[in-house]
Image (cartoon, grey):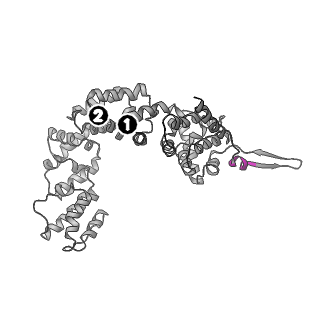
Amino acid sequence: MLRLRNSLFPLLRAASPLPSPIHRRACRLLSNSTSTAITPAPFSLEDYLVASCGLAPAQAREVSKKAFHELSRAGRRPSDELSSSRINSASNPDAILALLSGAGLSRDDIAAVVSADPLILRASVKNIAPRLLALQDRLGLSTPQIARFVLVGSRALRDCDVIPRLEFFISFYGSFEQVLVAVKRCMTLLTASPERLIKPNIALLRQWGVQNIVQLCTDNAWVLTFKPERVKEFLLRAEELGVPPTSRMFRHAVATISRNSKDRVAAKLEFYKRILGVSESEVSTAVSKMPNILGFSDEILLRKIKFLVNEAAMEPRYIVERPVMFALSLEKRLVPRHYIMKVLQEKGLLDSSMSFYSAVALGEDTFKSKFIDRHKDSVPGLADTYAAARAGIVPSRI
């Protein structure tokens, strides 16, 4: 405890109000026939962002608007809030900047933090200082790690005692780096209640027998921030789709369902049945293989299906049995590879056993090796043609 106080004292001292460059410039000279006085102009957040945080004027204007918007969204009156005791002058913002600099953030890092979260400038210095210090003393984070955390976790840093939450998440995810990945995908992860939401949801996932819970909670961290009753609903709906909790696809089913309403999912299932002319059980099989096909746009799906049926001459039942094709880019993958295969087929260079599905399922480097590089001497210009097709340019015949 003594070491903590000794470490905290210079940090708090560094955070004390500093002379502000914007405050010096924010003075104007009032003169009349008998007297001259210097009166400071009202504090301008926009000007401060330029002078002290290094933002360009246009960027400072947008960040200032963002601050007012966030205060309005929180149900506060921006005019009152920005004139409160911590933001009616440069004193508190200067102290916050000093804290961030003392924690090892560079000028560019600080500009990025303030741009993402301008309300950090009105945070309580007495709260922020010990929390920054505890990131090093209690969690053992390095200076670069602290800087990376503040860039994504500044809201949590100013809103709550983030240290116990970080301790829990580091234990759950396995490392600080994995926590950062999750927080980047869900900024509210660190501010959600651990006791009411986070821990009960993790327990629910474990009770359900979900495989690879950590991966689910990394890729789709927002699931942990819902009420447990709603998460249970997601789990039930995923099972109803025919995806068992023990399946490696279950986490994908939960993630897809959490982003789509029950009515939207039902409409998507009906879409596949109607457009492809297949049965409900066949669509269910496709969903069990690749649940995220439920989240794809009808318009994009329709274009892909038309291409696969009309140009690639595939049967609808064959398509639905291979749902990965719904996830492949029409412009970057399906159309260019189909064109290359047609060229090679016309020249008698295509292996008759190679199906279109087998070709589009290959990774990009493997496809180029088997279909482009292998025939570069016998079909000059094939690589350029493929590149043009992927860029959306209709290639001339070669």
Residue visible at 22% across and 66% down in the picture: 372
Residue in the foreground of this view, choosing between 89 and 100: 100
Q: Sequence-wise, which precedes: disc 2 or disc 1?
A: 1
Residue in the foreground of this view, choosing between 84 and 362: 362
Please state, as top left, top right, bottom left or bottom right, where the N terminus lies in the image: top right
Residue in the foreground of this view, choosing between 140 and 128: 140
Residue visible at 70% across and 46% down in the picture: 23
Residue 70 image offset from top left, x and y in percent: 53, 39
Rate crowding at label 2 as few (under 14), some (14 to 19) or many (20 or more) other CA atoms within 10 Å: few
Residue holding disc 1:
173
Residue 121 image offset from top left, x and y in percent: 60, 40
Does residue 127 appear left or right of residue 234 in this picture?
right
Residue visible at 22% across and 48% down in the picture: 324
Does residue 280 appear left or right of residue 252 in this picture?
left
Q: Is residue 35 above or below residue 360?
A: above
Does residue 326 appear left or right of residue 16 in this picture?
left
Q: Which residues are magenta?
A: 21-27
Residue 57 image offset from top left, x and y in percent: 60, 53
Q: Is residue 362 above or below residue 117?
A: below
Residue holding disc 2:
262
Dominant SS type (magenta): helix
Residue visible at 25% across and 36% down in the picture: 250
- Disc 2 marks a residue whose amino acid type is Lys
